[in-house]
Amino acid sequence: MYQFQYFRPKSLDEARKLYENNGDAKFLAGGQTLIPTLKQRLAQPTALIDLGGIAMSGIKVAGGVVTIGAGTKHFDVASSADVKGAIPALSHLASHIGDPAVRHMGTLGGSIANNDPAADYPAAVLGLGATIKTTSRTISADDFFTGMFETALEEGEIITEVSFPVPEKAAYMKFPNPASRYAMVGVFVAKTKGGVRVAVTGAASSVFRESAMEAALTKSFTPDAVAGIKVSPGNMNSDLHGTAEYRAHLVTVMAKRAVATIA
Amino acid sequence: MPSVAMTVNGKAVSGEVETRTLLVHFLRENLRLTGTHVGCDTSQCGACVVHVNGKAVKSCTMLAVQAEGAQVTTVEGLTQDGKLHPVQAAFKEHHGLQCGFCTPGMIMTAVDMIRRIPDLDEKTIRAELEGNLCRCTGYQNIVKAIEAASKEMKGARA
């Protein structure tokens, strides 16, 4: 790791000021992606502003909405009876991020602010049509994820909580990379008040909605409705773990399996 | 250099560290608690697992300064009055190790899962060991040891 200054503010106000006063600062949440990134010298922030000292964790279920504080650990989401009761698919997703030790540190806010193309949480946030609350505004999931490791967050803007509307039903199916457990492809399918939503992670440069599948599932919410849909490999990732064609095929298979668990 | 203070194995400790010093290096190099190992150094193998505020974490993926004020337990902290912790004893009894490199992390992960999950079956143990790699044993005896320790500790609590 390169050298950096370290701050642990007690409030969001203090965090924002520290960010403004430090040229190339980065916010540190659970650190499960940022610290490995720093170890590989893939980033060189002048300062780390640790958000771990600011109370931003907790889970509330009220009025058909599950609201989760940005600092809430994956483990706490996975083991929450409230989340499991309201949105079992979200609980299932959180329980399959990384491994138990990683889930004890990693946070919801950190995961979606990073927007790793193969991360799990972006699929739930987009698939459920969640709302992201920050220090300055609220952002809809459809506007939040803008590209590979890119989000709508402005400089110094901090996610404080995410609200997930409770769907009629939802499921998440991922094909994990056998070594890292990141999603080779993960598909989140939700039947919501606003219609059917299908969000795909791991396959392309950023999480995206698969509109052909949404249309097909709106007509008939069955595995067969998506089984015949061929996804174009045009925008898919191709790397040592799998080709674009392989990932495109996996999108259909994972979507079919997700629907099968709830149809 | 910043200084950091925390409680390790019940003892108040402090030291001068760089901000970039990892918790595992603070434990091994400043405190000379070399039971905690660095295996892959990429959050995958789990040889560095310790407990921070009662939860298993990978100490190679946490800065020492993040543990300011925390309660840390390493494998050295499990033995009480010269007597092996039930999980340590079970690893010995069931031959849950060969070279022993992964063992401290395996044991700390095992203690954590036994604390969280009252009825551990083989399938759950294997799933919970997701973040701990062993290159010798094929996991068979590690799983057996954790299952045995879990039963014994449950018996002791009853």
Image (spheres, grey):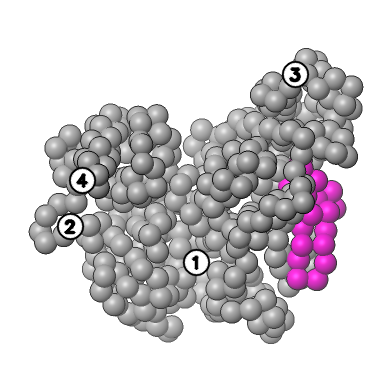
The residue drawn where x is 36% and y is 54% is B49
The residue under label 3 is which amino acid type? Pro
Left or right of B98 on screen, residue B105: right
Residue B74, given in percent of the width and then of the height, sits at: 28, 60
Q: Which amino acid does label 4 sit on?
A: Ala
Along the viewing direction, whichever of A163 and A34 lies nearer the viewer? A163
Q: Earlier in the sequence, mark 2 or mark 4?
A: 2
* Residue B39 seen by the camera: no
Closer to the eye: label 4 or 3: 4
The amino acid marked with disc number 1 is: Met
Magenta stretch encompasses residue B51: no
Task: Kindly identify which residue carries mark 1.
Answer: A1
Name the residue carrying label 4.
B156
Q: Distance between the residues labelled 4 and 3?
A: 49 Å
Q: Do callouts 2 and 1 mark residues in contact (Cβ within 8 Å)?
A: no
Q: Mark 3 points at which residue?
A: A223
State the image quarter where residue A20 is shown.
bottom right
Q: Residue A136, image x and y in percent?
A: 80, 71
Say whether residue A135 is magenta. Answer: yes
From the viewer's side, name the closer residue of A75 and B37.
A75
Q: Mark 3 lies on which chain?
A: A
